[in-house]
Amino acid sequence: MSSGSIRVLIADDQQMVRQGFGVLLDVQPDIEVVGQAVDGRDAVAKVAELAPDVVLMDIRMPELNGIEATRHVTAHAPGTRVLVLTTFDLDDYVYEALCAGASGFLLKDASADQLAEAVRVVAAGDALLAPGITRRLIAEFSRMNGRPRGPLKARVGTLTERETEVLALIAQGLSNAEIAERLVVAEQTVKTHVGRILVKLGLRDRTQAAVFAYESGLVRPSGS
């Protein structure tokens, strides 16, 4: 493997899942599986030891569940991104994992190409928002959470009008290129706005920005 390979840790309590994902990823020329973890506590320890670029994190694991493990990893290993693995696209734990700092989620029945692309997207610092299912999940559980949170709503006021507009479009799952086309500006301009939004709101990435947009009430789930 080249030094530029994306280093991946696979955390799942099922050996067949770990081995299966390992086989699928190891054939990718730009991805290297550097380790496996059998539960959340093991995942936290392996992240500290191996410093992977991406962790494929199962949510339901013994010892320490994937949500708590994700929270620990994102707090103590800012250079490591977490990609949550789940069996169901509307698993209520997924929303909690996104709030804990995960950069996106992937269904366990994803194809080899989808798995590899998801790892690349997350490693690049982007978030898995494109496949509309993530937007539906965020919308569904923000609706369940009730009214917008006052403190979050106040923080939206720190953004400029254009930044607020960009944040709303991020929450709708649009990419930088799509936002640039919608606003008739250069893509680099959108990247600048996104960067400023994350800094001003103290957010890790686009997934957290989307969650924030719903929870602050800036964007309303469809039908509400």
Image (cartoon, helix red, strand yellow):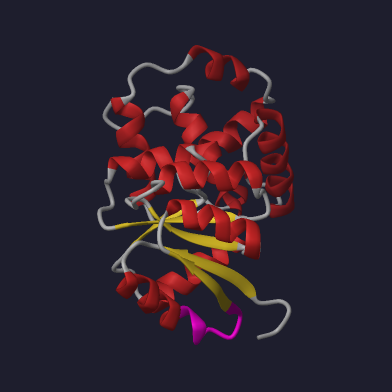
Q: Is residue 150 above or below residue 139?
A: above
Point 50% across, 87% down: residue: 27
Tell me residue 81's x, y (percent).
58, 55
Tell me residue 58's x, y (percent).
38, 56
Q: Is residue 135 left or right of residue 203?
A: left
**Quadrant placement of the C terminus:** top left
Point 62% across, 19% down: residue: 155
Q: Is residue 91 left or right of residue 58?
A: left
Q: Is residue 167 above or below residue 56?
A: above
Highlighted range, magenta: 25-31
Q: How many marks?
A: 0
The quadrant in which residue 48 appears is bottom right
Note whether residue 123 is visible: yes
Q: Please state which of residues 188 and 95 is positioned toward the viewer in this rendering.
A: 95
Q: Please state which of residues 5 and 90 is positioned toward the viewer in this rendering.
A: 5
Tell me residue 104's x, y (percent).
46, 52
Point 53% across, 66% down: residue: 9
Point 71% across, 76% down: residue: 4
